[in-house]
Amino acid sequence: MLTQTSFQGKLNKTEDLFIPFIEAGDPTPEVTIDLALKLQEAGADILELGIPYSDPLADGPTIQRAAKRALDNGMSLQQAIELIPDMRANGLEIPVVVFTYYNPVLRIGEEKFFKLLEEHGAEGVLIPDLPHEESESVRELALKHDIEYISLVAPNSEERIQKIASEARGFLYCVSTLGVTGGENQLSSEVTDFIQKVKEHSPVPVAVGFGISTNEDVQMIRQHADGVIIGSKIIRLVEAEVENLKDDSKRHEALNRFYENVRELVE
Amino acid sequence: MLTQTSFQGKLNKTEDLFIPFIEAGDPTPEVTIDLALKLQEAGADILELGIPYSDPLADGPTIQRAAKRALDNGMSLQQAIELIPDMRANGLEIPVVVFTYYNPVLRIGEEKFFKLLEEHGAEGVLIPDLPHEESESVRELALKHDIEYISLVAPNSEERIQKIASEARGFLYCVSTLGVTGGENQLSSEVTDFIQKVKEHSPVPVAVGFGISTNEDVQMIRQHADGVIIGSKIIRLVEAEVENLKDDSKRHEALNRFYENVRELVE
Amino acid sequence: MEQVYPDQQGRYGDFGGKYVPETLMAPLQELEEALDEAMADREFIAEYHGVLEKYAGRPTALTYADKVTEILGGAKIYLKREDLLHTGAHKLNNAIGQALLAKRMGKQKIIAETGAGQHGVASATVAAKFGLECKVFMGEEDIRRQEPNVFRMKMLGAEVIPVSSGRGTLKDATNEAIRYWVANCEDTFYLIGSVVGPHPYPRMVRDFQRIIGDESKRQFLEGEPTLPDYIYACVGGGSNAIGMFHPFLEDDVELVGVEAAGKGVDTEEHAATLTKGDRGVIHGSLTFLLQDEHGQITEPYSISAGLDYPGIGPEHAYLFDSKQVRYEAVTDEEAMDALKLLTETEGIIPAVESAHALAQAFKEAKDMSADKTILINLSGRGDKDLATIMNHFKGEE
Amino acid sequence: MEQVYPDQQGRYGDFGGKYVPETLMAPLQELEEALDEAMADREFIAEYHGVLEKYAGRPTALTYADKVTEILGGAKIYLKREDLLHTGAHKLNNAIGQALLAKRMGKQKIIAETGAGQHGVASATVAAKFGLECKVFMGEEDIRRQEPNVFRMKMLGAEVIPVSSGRGTLKDATNEAIRYWVANCEDTFYLIGSVVGPHPYPRMVRDFQRIIGDESKRQFLEGEPTLPDYIYACVGGGSNAIGMFHPFLEDDVELVGVEAAGKGVDTEEHAATLTKGDRGVIHGSLTFLLQDEHGQITEPYSISAGLDYPGIGPEHAYLFDSKQVRYEAVTDEEAMDALKLLTETEGIIPAVESAHALAQAFKEAKDMSADKTILINLSGRGDKDLATIMNHFKGEE
Ligand SMILES: Cc1ncc(COP(=O)(O)O)c(C=O)c1O
Ligand SMILES: Cc1ncc(COP(=O)(O)O)c(C=O)c1O
């Protein structure tokens, strides 16, 4: 592939990446747009935009709650994707990676899904319940639609690491620990070895996620990987302000507090 | 047997017998004595003195309640037998048949039981759960102690009727109906045939019991048998006055009412 | 040579007989004749065995309880799994036999007494299967503590008749059933649930339950392949115990019947008939029973409704008296501990009744050498006892 | 010739596969290797069959339901009696197989999800028997309606973990079990209760359940002696149905899977996955499921906790899609009527799940000629459902 992908075109750097996760529609579609912009302001390099799902197998209670809030408001896969042009119109420039479970994709149809992504200016997709072996056709479609298909590797991926890493696109999502999202993370020396090994094979930046919730975590990851992915912790910051964010008269200040908290986390 | 038994000696007639049943100790030992005398006054020819038992298999709810009242007052087989001399001292002249289940007899010992009966002036014994086949040794002991062993026959005794009836002593207790005591009695033509058959074989008077509760029942039985046995109905008359009978100031009148009711039943 | 008990009069030594109101003499005679005829009829026996196999789930398994054996560190422990029988206890063996006999006798109605409700459920079950009308007499206290079984009986189409006399347990239900039978013996078959009652009941129920022992003997000889050194069974009326013991009576096997000691044999609250009772007559037969000095039957107590009975089958009285079987008594507490141990180590929740046999066996097994083998009759499963078990252990959580 | 499904990728036609978080790919690989090795090891197979026979009570009976046959007046009706299996349902067949595999893999901890509680009880049972630590995930709604099973699990030493997400039923319990497994896959064996989940689960569970069909086939040929014309089984996840159907797939037998239509397939409240669902991914495999237009999984409903599941095993999806098996749906009402009929005529109280198979079979049997024979898989006993049954029929008294 000689030409640059849209993802690559929008990514400003390939090191020290900050990749936050928010759930589309949590607590409202409008707030999601505001949060995306605030995160960019706070230094986000890539936005992971979560699609709320009824049965998020890879997620812990925090993201389950976020999904429930979003679903209760009627958020869907298509509506979530349709938020991206609004984000862009309001100044979002960083690449957007849509994070969705596989079933909504199947339901809407894979072809239609990728067309929607392309048309609405998404640059990547991550499907946590579609491992490498099941994703071949999806990866081809992604390629065709100029969407980076983000792969994951886990500490127990073992021999499969090399294959997954070497075929990685966009960035490679390194699951730092066995478990669902939102757990506590203790970075052991084994994890740094694991990251090292992944980096050896990966043609794209290697970002680490799962359970990163403090500034110390962030600093530690930075020493080893090309980026940090922060999900549940960001959701908890949203959750702390959820009532204020829904209130027109309080939203502005809530967003500012959110911004300060994110800055504290990643600076 | 040429000599007369005590039972025969005390029995004034061998036809048109009225044989009431009371439970020893119901509601108190003293009242039992009073009731026995009132029954004699009302024309009783033989007194059936029931021994209260915890598990009276052949008895319906009325006699079960009487037994419970007596047992709650501490009545026992021996105490019940010891009431007979008191009855005699107060003027009771008719034969007394002790009605008891077999277990209390076994417990006290068969020998001792018959000695007690003899010493205390009882003339007969009836053990409803000791059928002919199981009663040989008891019948021998009875004979030895000048106690009449009262046998029962039932409508379904069939071929056994002849044997039981021909060996009967004192009087023969004809169970008029299948069932426990206290039921309703409908004297069918089969029953009169049955009584007839029993009478053919019995050397002693044939009395009919179980479920006789109205003057009409009594009249009907008199046409066919030598006597009527009235149990539950008498107990119900006691029961109706039970509180008054326990009250010294009201006993006299209660006994009179009891007397009137019994007269009405059998006259 | 196997001894032939009972004799013609229904006697096991001094015990047994027919101590019943005159009205029952004829139906008992009719029953005995029909029974003798049936038991001599190959077709009847084949039908009985066919229903046991194709409907009730016989043969039941013989399970080697390896984990509890290891934990106790003594004799090898085997379990005869009557808990796997349809409806959950050995009672069905007998109910099937008697129901087939009732049908053969042309009786369309059956009655039964029940304590734990297992015999009631078994009776209601065979009534449904063979198209008979069924009434079950059950004490009010037992209705309370065995509620699921009450509902099962009703679902099966039986009428459950609450008995309030006495303490409202098995003894009282039996009295009431007998009283009902006296009045209705012409068209009603009384399906007794244990080896109690007047002759020929104790013999009939034994013969319908000895399948337990016959099967165990065959399975043991196939597996081990010798006979067990000890056999344990709980004793309420005594049907599962006699059924298990009978085929081993002439063998070199130590047989142990286990009664319910309730809160202790030295308290007033127990059901240890042989350990603490005296000779007497109950429910139509001469046997041992719990009674006071005046011959009044006393109220027994056991945590298990199925052992909460003041009498015992006359054949047990005889086996006790002649020392052919050893009888022990086990408290509520010991039984419940054994229940817990079996549940946690073998994944089998036994009936509280059966847990009495387990408790005694476990106690003795510990001190035996590893070359000894013991067999415990697991007479039923504990599902019916969940409320009792929950209640008992709730303090411990 | 028997078809070899699934293929190497765990596919049954389009269905199956492994749609799981990356973290589970390694444990699934490890499981598949251990499973293939075990299934090729005669000793393992012998151990599995040994436990089934000596502990769990196999073979279970094949009962000719003469009375219900007579009442319906059509085909001859046979019942495969999984209700007689230890712990009361077919679930134990699979739990034994997986527990033996867990032991062989050196895993000391097992987890399980449960709906009706039968798989939870089966898992807790094998955990006790084989000395494993056990956690059972169970939805809060199911904990409420299957209370006796919750207590049984606790007695057996398992930890019951209440799941409050969703409607608190089987789907949610499964989600939570998978999440737990993701975090603890190194030392924990996930003992799935039906032919669902990522490959190799659907194949493994099927192979541990096909004993039902294998035995039935043998028993039928011994008895009738031809194969049945129709076979019915209820379908929740689909394990009892696949276990029964699989050995008959190549035979001239019409196979009928029965789903739960709840309050009616035209209402919102049902669990009729094949009848009303669409293709999608649930719990790691591609199959049919109940979902809304956006691909959100919808909440199923059935009176029976064991059928209250929005998905179905991928092999069923394939058999449905390829029309090898016919699938029907039966309402709560129809199932409960069939439960009542079987109880009152045959003296067998079936599980509410199994009653769905009965209802469909009875409906069809009526119109068949008397020379047809049908076989119904009675997957479990109704003891666990007494509260549900009581509640359902209480209006009628
Ligand atoms: C499981 C079980 N075991 C034992 C018994 C005691 O009866 P038996 O001594 O007649 O076996 C009962 C009685 O209900 C029972 O249900
Ligand atoms: C008795 C019974 N039958 C059927 C089922 C449904 O499961 P499956 O479809 O996997 O057999 C269950 C589930 O709990 C059950 O308990």
Image (tube, coloured by chain):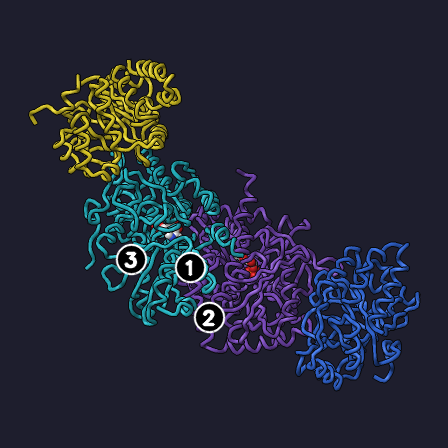
Chain colours: A yellow, B blue, C purple, D cyan
**Which of the two marks, 2 or 1, is nearer to us in this view?**
1
Where is mark 2, residue-wise? C48
How far separated are the C-alphas under marks 1 and 3? 22 Å
**Position of residue B25 in the picture relative to residue A193 (left or right):** right
Assign a secondary structure to mark 1.
Answer: helix
Chain assignment, label 2: C
Q: Quadrant of ligand 1?
A: bottom right
Assign a secondary structure to mark 2.
Answer: helix
Q: Amino acid at mark 3?
A: Phe
Chain assignment, label 3: D
Where is mark 3, residue-wise? D245
**Position of residue A52 in the picture relative to residue D378 (left or right):** left
Residue C211 numbered tag = none
Seen from the viewer's position, the closer of residues B180 and D320 is D320
Tags 1 and 3 on a common chain: yes
Residue D338 numbered tag = 1
Tags 2 and 1 on a common chain: no
Mark positioned earlier in the residue sequence (1 or 3)? 3
